[in-house]
């Protein structure tokens, strides 16, 4: 029996819970302030979600957790069987984890209406009772802390024009896709869907983003509930050699447009010892503090690409090159 410690307002918690559900891995879902406090000292970085293994050990960081579970449980894998498509699925999951998360953070903490509702809801989730005064005090403090972190995570008002434009391109592609086909690499969900779902799950809750999704992307909005619990889905991967769907190509174009320059600018700044980095896309600028975790993401992507069989590289290289995603992997 596994136990997943997380929060309803945490995109990575929702991502991991959806993975466990889809893979039919027996688990307990434990959320709230007390549950999180009980495991914060069990992991090196006290961030959720935290997964407790049946042997009593603890770990976090959703992507390594997903691959570890793949090693431990062979049934109902979420990694495409074709190594070329498996790499593309991983690249899209990484894009969602590290770039789309900025939309989640920005929509939640930039506008007054979202700050007010979500800080109160997060307090409600945290205490599950205990009185209004305690919840309100916690909400005020948490709101102040999160708003104060906006520049650190790159979700300033100046940056949000690029973040929002990118997010809406992703949603437009998803909206056009899900009315015809539910998934990206076959008739079953992959790691990519869960990465995308995790971030969009919060856009489907927060006031401003939810209104936007309901009005402009209603099928994508509903699709979130389908990915939230895919335990009833029995499907197949596309056969090896099947060209990727148009939506995958569109997503890769977005990776090349915004995520590649983001990763490279961050890495270049870190190498030069600079504390901030900047890049521009389509006349929209983006500035953020240099961040070490994304350097690890870039190194991991390059390592995974280098490890692909030559035949798999040959099939996806033209696609990656067209999307502007190849050179940064070398």
Image (cartoon, rainbow, N blue to C red):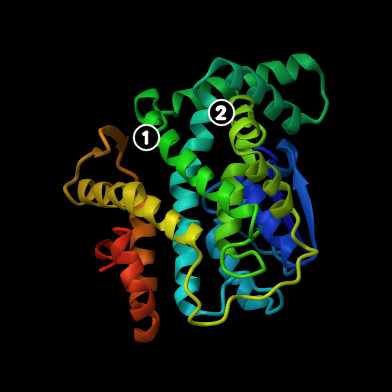
- Distance from disc 2 to disc 1, alpha carbons, whole Å, reads 16 Å
Q: Is residue 323 left or right of residue 192?
A: left
Task: Say which element carries label 2.
Answer: helix
Specify the quadrant of the image occupied by residue 210: top right
Q: Is residue 11 left or right of residue 330?
A: right
Residue at 53% across / 64% down in the picture? 64
Residue 224 seen anywhere in this rendered image of the structure: yes
The tag on residue 108 is: 2
Depth order, front residue of 261/41: 261
Name the front one of labels 2 and 1.
1
Tell me where residue 42 appears, x and y as whole percent.
Answer: 62, 53
How many marks overall? 2
Task: Say which element carries label 1.
Answer: helix
Residue at 52% across / 27% down in the picture? 146
Dot 1 surroundings within 10 Å: few (below 14), some, or many (20 or more)? some
Residue 60 seen anywhere in this rendered image of the structure: no
Lower position in the chain sequence, tag 2 or tag 1: 2
Tell me where residue 203 appears, x and y as whole percent.
Answer: 60, 36
Tell me where residue 71 appears, x and y as whole percent.
Answer: 61, 77
Name above or below for residue 305 compared with residue 267. below
Tell me where residue 317 appears, x and y as whole percent.
Answer: 32, 72
Q: Dot 1 corresponds to which residue?
A: 162
Please say if the residues under marks 2 and 1 sit with CB atoms less than 8 Å apart.
no
Q: Quadrant of the C terminus?
A: bottom left
Name above or below for residue 232 compared with residue 261. below
Residue at 44% across / 34% down in the picture? 164
């Amino acid at each position: 029996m596994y136990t997943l410690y997380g929060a309803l307002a945490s995109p990575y918690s929702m991502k991991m819970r959806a993975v466990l559900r889809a893979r039919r891995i027996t688990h307990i879902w434990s959320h709230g302030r007390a549950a999180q406090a009980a495991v914060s000292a069990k992991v090196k970085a006290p961030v959720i979600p935290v997964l407790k293994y049946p042997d009593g050990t603890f770990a976090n960081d959703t992507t390594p957790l997903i691959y570890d579970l793949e090693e431990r449980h062979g049934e109902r894998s979420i990694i495409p069987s074709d190594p070329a498509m498996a790499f593309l699925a991983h690249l899209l999951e990484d894009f969602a984890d590290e770039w789309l998360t900025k939309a989640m953070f920005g929509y939640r903490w930039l506008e007054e209406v979202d700050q007010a509702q979500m800080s109160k809801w997060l307090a409600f989730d945290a205490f599950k009772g205990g009185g209004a005064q305690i919840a309100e005090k916690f909400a005020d403090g948490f709101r102040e802390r999160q708003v104060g972190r906006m520049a650190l995570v790159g979700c300033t008002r100046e940056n949000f024009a690029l973040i929002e434009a990118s997010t809406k391109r992703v949603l437009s592609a998803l909206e056009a896709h899900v009315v015809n086909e539910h998934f990206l690499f076959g008739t079953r969900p992959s790691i990519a869907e869960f990465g995308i779902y995790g971030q969009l799950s919060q856009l489907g809750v927060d006031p401003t983003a939810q209104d936007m999704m309901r009005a402009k992307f209603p099928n994508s909005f509903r699709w979130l509930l389908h990915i939230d619990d895919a335990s009833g889905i029995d499907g197949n991967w596309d056969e090896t050699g099947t060209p990727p769907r148009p939506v995958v190509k569109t997503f890769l174009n977005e990776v090349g447009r915004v995520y590649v320059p983001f990763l490279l600018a961050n890495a270049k700044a870190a190498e030069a010892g600079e504390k901030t980095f900047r890049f521009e896309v389509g006349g929209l600028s983006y500035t953020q503090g240099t961040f070490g975790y994304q350097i690890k993401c870039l190194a991991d992507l390059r390592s995974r690409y280098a490890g692909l069989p030559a035949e798999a590289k040959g099939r996806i290289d033209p696609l990656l090159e067209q999307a502007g995603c190849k050179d940064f992997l070398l």
